[in-house]
Amino acid sequence: MKKLMICIGFLIVQNLFSQSRIATVNAGSHLIKTTDWSEFKTANILVTKLDGSKSHIYTYNTVRATNPNAMNVDGLEDDFEQGSEVKVYILKPKASGFKSKPILAKVNGGSHLMKTTDWSIYNNKTILVEEINGLNQNVYSYSSARPINANAMYVDGISADFEQNTDVHVYIIETFNFANGNVGIGTTTPSAKLEILRDANLTSSISLPSSALVLRADNDGSDATLRFGVDNTNLKAVIQTQQTSTGSKFDLLLNPFGGNVGIGTTNPGTWKLAVNGNIRAKEIKVETGWSDFVFYDDYKLPTLQEVENHIKEKGHLKDIPSAKDVEENGVFLGEMDSKLLQKIEELTLYTIQQEKTLEKQSKEIQNLKLLNQKFLELQLRLDKLENKN
């Protein structure tokens, strides 16, 4: 049996950082650099030594004092030695979305991503560009096709986010949209905690492109998948197992290690499957005990008089629930079939008894007919003798 493991690649909402500024810790709690500090003075920032041996986050509480050459960061002198060379980042929300496998490229030529590759699959998609150290990333939404050639793709605004010659990973992503605390994929107005907008045509086997959600066991092209979809045309929803390469189907297990399943009910109780409604099936196999004990020599078959007395007193056959009991508690199919078979077997025994009784009565009647015939013959002979005298 194929094992299905949930393995979805996505970016988790967390903090990442802006393009860094290299500065020097000096004059107490000052970051010394001739730059525009205006974006940093009102933001949460990360300061890390160039060799990565020490880092610290400084939360924004009040506007930091700045001038064109320096910014004061309260508490900085307690964490870093004077003269330390550091990188300074602005903390910002991390972009989120499903992402493809990355390619390695270089920011160069202004706003170009440089790499010899097929850029046609990227130029009309929303892309994520991330420094290979993972500290700086930005999402560039698709508005119109980006200019490309075999060696580069132009990305508007990328030069403002990354320094020239920066090595980056480039991803294709389906962005998450956040609204009122909800997450949407394919929709900007999600009405639930997670809403995926995708119409699946389920007139035939559900396919990978038409599935709204696919859980894959691995990514080798022949992996097992669990696919979910909603067909708006036919108003149907589907959960389907399928192997990617062959299209073959495999078993879907519900609560294989415990727990119960309810359909049309929020309280399945102790039943492994509780259905509040009708079930249609071509065949149902029930594994239960059977009633052949009726044919055992030691079985005490009730007399018909006992059966009649029970019916008069209880209003139903012995060992069979009453109509009221069935209405209140239902019946177990296996148990009821066994009880009904018991009654059928009892009826069979009654029929056999009656057949034997009828055969005996038939013989007795035949003997009586023979005796009656002989009696008539004797009577006739007596009548003749009397007439002679």
Image (cartoon, grey):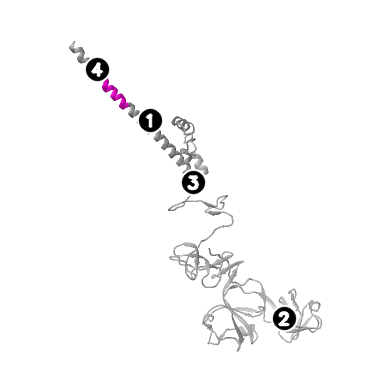
Assign a secondary structure to mark 1. helix
Q: Residue furthest bottom?
A: 109
Q: Residues within 10 Å of mark 3 (few under 14, many from 20)?
A: some
Looking at the picture, does residue 371 appear above or below residue 103? above
Say which mark, if any, is on residue 379: 4
Q: Residue furthest left?
A: 388
Q: How many neighbours does mark 4 have within 10 angstroms: few (below 14), some (14-19), or many (20 or more)?
A: few
Seen from the viewer's position, the closer of residues 7 and 138 is 7
The image position of residue 220, as x and y in percent, is 54, 73
Q: Amino acid at mark 1?
A: Thr
Using the image, tell me which numbered label, if any, was put on residue 334: 3
Mark 2, residue position: 88
| Residues at circles 3 and 2 in contact by the CB criterion of under 8 Å | no
Point 69% across, 78% down: residue: 90
Whole-number angstrom distance, CA of label 2 to CA of label 1: 108 Å
The relative height of residue 375 versus residue 47 in the rendered view (above or below) is: above
Work out whether mark 2 precedes mark 4 in sequence or the reverse, and give the earlier one.
Answer: 2
- Going 55% across and 58% down the picture, which residue do you hit? 254
Q: Is residue 378 magenta?
A: yes
Residue 171 image offset from top left, x and y in percent: 58, 78
- Helix, strand or loop status at disc 3: helix
Q: Residues within 10 Å of mark 1 (few under 14, many from 20)?
A: few
Secondary structure state at the residue bearing disc 2? strand
